[in-house]
């Protein structure tokens, strides 16, 4: 799970490193804004991965093979509808979002160049979320790991060819990611078909009628509604970080992009433990084993704390060196160095929110996730930023750190009060 998750943010880190070695900061700033406006949609649709994993894990625990297939087909149906809608509405969406993001004329220009290409990858990206969630729910972590490794190798090779050799600059990043997403989609569908082998034709009978069953869809969308609201609140904070950084200058938005990519690398690594807990908690709930759930929780707490401490030590010792690997623009490197201490302390503060998110996804406790996220966003993040905004980008990072800490604390309180009622 950890290896699978660490490969995911490598795609962003590779993009940042490749574009970060071009001569101007606005290339990195533009690609950062472009990534934000496109991936905002896929991040908001994170419920596709989360709910699919939780429901598939519970079906796996119940040994309900037909229900597991329905979880997959409902997710694929929703992913395709949202992906096609994004393609049809791309022009007004990109016009509004890039304008609202702010930044210099050069940043806006390259953001639009990137987004115009990358948005066509959304259908594949959303389908990939469902496929990944379903495979994880079936304890197919090794298959997911190889799926993501292949995707990132394709992206890495094409990044180098398109950006450095063909000199396509920001457009090259977008084309590389688009091709990688569709390659991943084809490989993921192949893995699912291989999972069923000769049994797939039998299971396809009456599948459409069962997939669009009104009662089942109502329950599916109720769970996803809560996760969507939770994700929307989370993305408000991430988007605000990027947009506010853009208003503070090209060097600030570029430096923040580097640090946020490092944070994503940290969070996805810690999410490996959370995802393992997610799958095992879902299986425990499906099999109705309370003791097993408690064992999963205690073990996950220990490993989450240990890995978070390791991340803190790594970035304390090697942070400046890692920043220079990503960019050689001296002004950007100097700015990123000045905000590096926030990244050093964040793993220990943020790790608990990742763990509890995983447990709650596996237990399909979407309502609690929604409520705690809304509190952390609107009662912690924005008030702290408002008070600390006189400190500029430091105030922004202080608000984000407080937000991540609040998420973990609120979920921990909820878990202690309610965990005996989950099964």
Image (cartoon, grey):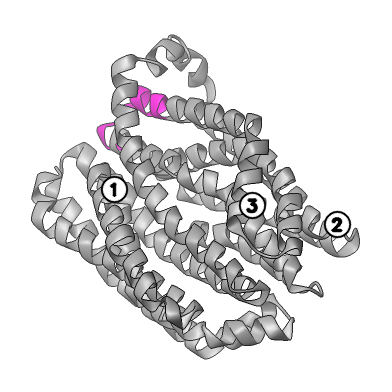
Q: Position of residue 270 (x, y in %)?
A: 41, 65
Q: Quarter holding the N terminus?
A: bottom left
State left or right for residue 186 relative to residue 319.
right
Q: Are marks 1 and 2 in contact (CB under 8 Å)?
A: no
User: Where is 329 relative to 422, above or below?
Assistant: below
Which sits in the foreground, 65 or 259?
A: 259
> What's the CA distance linking mark 1 and mark 3?
27 Å
Quarter of the image for residue 84 reads top right
Picture mark count: 3
334 over 186 or under it: above or below: below
- 72 part of magenta stretch: no
Visible residue check, residue 149: no
Q: Nearer the viewer, mark 1 or mark 3?
A: 3
Which residue is the site of mark 1? 370
- Residue 331 falls left or right of residue 96: right
Residue at disc 1, secondary structure: helix
Q: Disc 2 marks which residue? A: 168
Disc 2: CA contacts within 10 A as few (<14), some (14-19) or many (>=20): some
* Residue depicted at 31% across the width and 47% down the height: 361
Please report the residue visible at 41 percent of the width from the left and 18 percent of the height from the top: 211
Of pointers 1 and 2, the one earlier in the residue sequence: 2
User: What mark, if any, has residue 98 been given in the picture?
Assistant: 3
Tell me the mark number nearer the camera, choosing from 3 and 2: 3
Name the residue furthest right: 166
Highlighted range, magenta = 60-71
Taking 348 as reference, is 159 above or below it?
above
Indicate left or right for 150 with 56 as reference: right
Q: Nearer the viewer, residue 157 or 330?
A: 330
Left or right relative to 98: residue 412: left
In front here: 91 or 39? 91
Q: Mark 1 or 3 closer to N-term?
A: 3
């Amino acid at each position: 799970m950890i290896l699978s998750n660490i490969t995911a943010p490598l795609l962003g880190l590779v993009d940042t490193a490749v574009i970060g070695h071009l001569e101007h900061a606005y290339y990195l700033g533009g690609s950062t804004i472009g990534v934000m406006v496109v991936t905002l949609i896929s991040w908001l649709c994170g419920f596709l991965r989360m709910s699919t994993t939780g429901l598939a894990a519970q079906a796996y625990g119940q040994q309900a093979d037909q229900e597991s297939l329905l979880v997959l087909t409902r997710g694929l149906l929703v992913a395709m509808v949202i992906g096609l809608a994004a393609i049809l509405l791309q022009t007004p969406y990109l016009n509004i979002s890039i304008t609202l993001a702010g930044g210099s004329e050069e940043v806006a220009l390259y953001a639009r160049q990137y987004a115009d290409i990358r948005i066509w990858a959304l259908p594949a990206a959303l389908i990939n979320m469902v496929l990944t969630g379903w495979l994880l729910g079936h304890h197919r972590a090794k298959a997911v790991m190889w799926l993501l490794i292949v995707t990132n190798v394709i992206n890495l090779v094409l990044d180098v060819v398109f950006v450095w050799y063909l000199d396509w600059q920001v457009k090259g990043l977008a084309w590389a990611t688009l091709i990688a997403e569709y390659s991943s989609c084809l490989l993921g569908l192949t893995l699912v078909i291989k999972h069923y082998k000769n049994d797939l034709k039998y299971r396809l009978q009456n599948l459409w009628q069962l997939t669009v069953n009104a009662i089942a869809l109502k329950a599916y969308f109720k769970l996803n509604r809560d996760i969507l609201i939770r994700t929307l609140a989370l993305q408000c904070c991430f988007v605000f970080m990027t947009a506010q950084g853009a208003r503070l200058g090209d060097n600030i938005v570029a430096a923040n992009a580097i640090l946020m990519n490092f944070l994503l690398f940290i969070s996805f690594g810690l999410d490996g433990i959370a995802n393992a807990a997610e799958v095992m908690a879902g299986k425990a709930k499906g099999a109705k084993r309370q003791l097993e759930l408690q064992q999963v929780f205690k073990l996950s707490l220990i490993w989450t704390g240990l890995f978070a401490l390791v991340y803190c030590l790594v970035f304390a010792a090697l942070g400046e060196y890692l920043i220079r690997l990503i960019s050689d623009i001296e002004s950007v490197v100097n700015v990123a160095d000045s905000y590096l201490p926030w990244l050093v302390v964040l793993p220990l503060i943020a790790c608990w929110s990742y763990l509890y998110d995983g447990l709650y996804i596996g237990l399909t406790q979407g309502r609690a996730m929604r409520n705690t996220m809304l509190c952390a966003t609107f009662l912690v993040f924005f008030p702290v930023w408002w008070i600390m905004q006189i400190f500029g980008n430091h105030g922004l990072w202080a608000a984000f750190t407080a937000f991540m800490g609040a998420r973990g604390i609120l979920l921990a309180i909820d878990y202690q009060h309610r965990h005996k009622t989950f099964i």
